[in-house]
Image (spheres, rainbow, N blue to C red):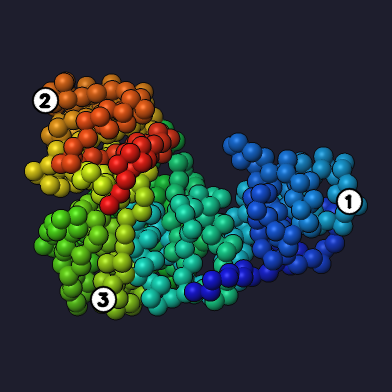
């Protein structure tokens, strides 16, 4: 892969055509190296798009980026007149006005996607998007010059930024689509026009913005509406709601999972320490795969990635190689062996009821001779059912029989109640702040401990991971 990316240049006319914007001021024959939205890192040759965010308004930084040598800005029409009261009109700066700069960023990405014969795989789901995308990238990059997000870029700003990094050499893009309200997946699919669309699963997540599991299903299903002509669909055969989308999916549908109706499926799943081994079958061939993770739910992610590789006619041997290169990233079932013998399962990146239960089940299957310690933060954005869902998770905690349970957040009491209702000894349950929990864990640390840390992004549970790692170090 080229270590010095050179995105496709942008003529002013391209920008106007892509966004339907107006040339408010300056020359109309400029050429820009690429598109930027971060005023701290914008280069002189880039077009600066002033995004209006929840915290910052990019329009406040327009004059600052011009002082850095930038000669093109894309702004909202209602802000353009205000900006023109300065010296924009005398700087020979290209100023393009649009109704909405966030939508314009997506329009630019859509335009860019069509400038090369790129194949696009887009995946969505309530759980496992990033792990599946990472596995799939390892598979396809053996055959394709692959464009993939630098980080968790899956929303209406992040996903377009990935497509705006497109170079002429790229032949395939692997994108993940996230959402917290209806219509977002539809818009993202409209931008990236997938050739292959994948839905990994649906589970209670973002209920605050969507209302019900059925609403989540409909929102995820928006991906299929945006498939490119001749597009194909990959669905989870083990998730009955997702599998039901097959009847309305355009084009070919390929199922993955553990059930017999899956064309890409796994069997003979076995634990190998902190790894998992299984037999993987695609139509006409079988192989054995070993994943560098103890989480059995990762098998489903691997099958989803393998299904996309199969549709791209990648040999099974290369699919196996790609899957076995996968290493869990920080915050997503990342196993940290601490110097004092503690096994720290860092799953702190995010949480919903499905993923918390899967993590608890993984902890239970690991090292039956070791102490199992669970540290949970709140699951956020669950709406009116939050308390009940936390109690339900608490009951699942009790079923997995940990030796200690630490809880933090506004719903810690509900989780604790569920654990007590499930039969867990109240003396094994502690509620406290991040600082208090970290201090108690450190004071009681034992070389035979397996510690699971999990919670929603807003809870910043990685602070506990950091405290433990800093105190004891890693092997």
Q: Is residue 147 visible?
A: yes
In terms of depth relative to the viewer, which is nearer, 375 or 177? 375
Residue 332, position as x, y percentages in the image: 33, 49
In terms of depth relative to the viewer, which is nearer, 333 or 267? 333
Q: Is residue 425 above or below residue 368?
A: above
* Nearest to N terminus: mark 3 or mark 1: 1
The residue that mark 1 highlights is 89
Residue 412, position as x, y percentages in the image: 30, 24
Cα–Cα gap, marks 2 and 3: 47 Å
Q: Is residue 202 visible?
A: no
Cα–Cα gap, marks 3 and 1: 59 Å
Residue 304, position as x, y percentages in the image: 30, 62
The residue that mark 2 highlights is 423
Is the residue marked by circle 2 packed among few (<14), some (14-19), or many (20+) residues within 10 Å? some
The circle drawn on residue 316 is 3
* Residue at (15, 34) in percent of width and height: 402
In terms of depth relative to the viewer, which is nearer, 45 or 202? 45
In terms of depth relative to the viewer, which is nearer, 391 or 203? 391
- In the shown orientation, is residue 94 left or right of residue 403? right
């Amino acid at each position: 892969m080229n270590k010095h990316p050179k995105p496709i240049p942008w003529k002013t006319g391209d920008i106007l055509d892509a966004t339907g914007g107006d040339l408010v001021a300056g020359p109309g024959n400029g050429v820009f190296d690429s598109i930027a939205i971060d005023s701290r890192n914008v280069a002189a040759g880039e077009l600066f798009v002033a995004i209006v965010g929840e915290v910052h308004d990019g329009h406040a930084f327009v004059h600052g980026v011009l002082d850095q040598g930038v000669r093109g800005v894309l702004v909202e029409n209602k802000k353009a007149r205000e900006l023109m009261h300065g010296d924009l009109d005398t700087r020979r700066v290209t100023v393009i006005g649009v109704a909405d700069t966030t939508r314009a960023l997506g329009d630019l990405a859509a335009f860019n996607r069509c400038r090369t014969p790129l194949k696009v795989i887009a995946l969505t789901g309530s759980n496992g998007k990033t792990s599946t995308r990472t596995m799939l990238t390892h598979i396809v990059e053996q055959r394709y010059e692959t464009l993939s997000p630098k980080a968790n870029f899956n929303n209406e700003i992040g996903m377009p930024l990935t497509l705006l990094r497109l170079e002429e050499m790229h032949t395939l893009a692997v994108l993940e689509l996230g959402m917290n309200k209806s219509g977002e997946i539809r818009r993202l699919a409209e931008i990236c026009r997938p050739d292959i669309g994948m839905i990994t699963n649906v589970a209670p997540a973002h209920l605050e913005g969507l209302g019900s599991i059925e609403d989540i299903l409909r929102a995820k299903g928006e991906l299929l509406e945006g498939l490119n002509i001749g597009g194909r669909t990959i669905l989870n055969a083990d998730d009955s709601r997702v599998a039901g989308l097959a009847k309305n999916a355009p084009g070919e549908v390929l199922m993955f999972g553990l059930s017999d109706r899956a064309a890409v499926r796994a069997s003979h799943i076995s634990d190998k320490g902190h790894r998992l081994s299984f037999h993987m079958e695609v139509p006409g061939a079988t192989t054995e795969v070993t994943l560098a993770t103890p989480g059995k739910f990762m098998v489903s992610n691997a099958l989803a990635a393998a299904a996309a590789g199969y549709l791209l006619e990648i040999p099974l041997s290369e699919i196996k190689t790609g899957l076995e290169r996968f290493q869990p990233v920080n915050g997503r079932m990342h196993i940290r062996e601490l110097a004092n013998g503690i096994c720290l399962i860092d799953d702190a990146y995010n949480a919903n009821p499905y993923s918390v239960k899967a993590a608890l089940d993984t902890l239970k299957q690991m090292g039956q001779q070791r102490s199992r310690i669970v540290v949970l933060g709140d699951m956020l954005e669950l709406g009116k059912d939050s308390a009940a869902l936390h109690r339900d998770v608490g009951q699942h905690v009790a079923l997995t029989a940990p030796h200690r349970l630490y809880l933090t957040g506004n719903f810690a009491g509900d989780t604790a109640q569920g654990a007590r209702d499930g039969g867990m000894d109240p003396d094994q349950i502690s509620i406290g702040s991040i600082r208090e929990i970290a201090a108690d864990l450190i004071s009681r640390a034992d070389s035979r401990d397996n510690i699971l840390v999990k919670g929603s992004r807003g809870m910043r549970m990685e602070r506990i991971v950091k405290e433990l790692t800093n105190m004891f170090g890693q092997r």
